[in-house]
Amino acid sequence: AQNYDDFLKQILDEVQLSDVLDVESVQELQDVLDKQSTPTEFPLRGSAAMETVGGDEKMCIFTVTVGKTVTATATGTVTEVENDEEFGHRIVIDHGNGYVTIYRNGSEPLVKPGDSVYVGRALYEITKKHEKMGYQIMKDEVYINPEEMLAIRG
């Protein structure tokens, strides 16, 4: 006896997306997926004061209100959750397209290595004495200025 999920997976494995959708629709879907895996979204729920640090390892440092949430700026996979000398903890997310984002904060991480994340997925909830949050973006292993990528509204 085959359950419904196994049956559905078998069908999906056998059907090519291009068999179901026309070429234009496949391209539109690819464009949506590319956009979701490019780190352009703001890494916080709510507003924050921001300063940019230059040098080789460019970084935005946000001063965040206690209780606000640090969020993933694009879809990807958590590759590291480690201690960070300056901020307390570091979360690294690989977006599968040459982009890697790095989040630094002293609050307890809400993800672990291997987790898949989506845009807006909570990574930390800001706690007292951990109001500073560092955010970095790398493209093809080179740090870029996050401020140039972020969609800042308001």
Image (spheres, rainbow, N blue to C red):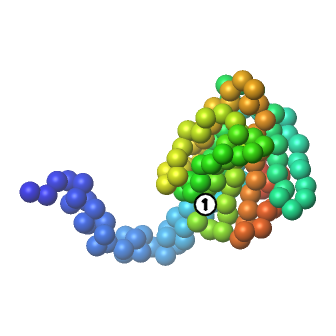
Quadrant of residue 87 in the image?
A: top right
Instruction: Identify the residue at the far left of this view.
Output: 1
Residue placed most toward the observer, 9 or 121: 121
Q: Residue 41 in the image: x percent, y percent? A: 69, 48
Number of callouts: 1
Quadrant of residue 61 in the image?
A: top right
Q: Residue 16 in the image: x percent, y percent? A: 36, 74
Q: Which residue is mark 1?
A: 94
Q: Residue 126 in the image: x percent, y percent? A: 68, 30
Residue in the image at 67% along x and 63% along y = 99
Residue in the image at 52% along x and 52% along y = 113
Residue 150 in view, yes or no: yes
Quadrant of residue 145 in the image?
A: bottom right
Q: Amino acid at mark 1?
A: Asp
Q: Quadrant of the N terminus?
A: bottom left
Residue 28 in view, yes or no: no
Residue placed most toward the observer, 7 or 66: 66
Q: Residue 138 in the image: x percent, y percent? A: 73, 62
**Left or right for 6, reference 151:** left
Q: Residues within 10 Å of mark 1 (few under 14, many from 20)?
A: many
Residue placed most toward the observer, 76 or 25: 76
Q: Quadrant of the C terminus?
A: top right
Label 1, secondary structure: give it.
Answer: strand
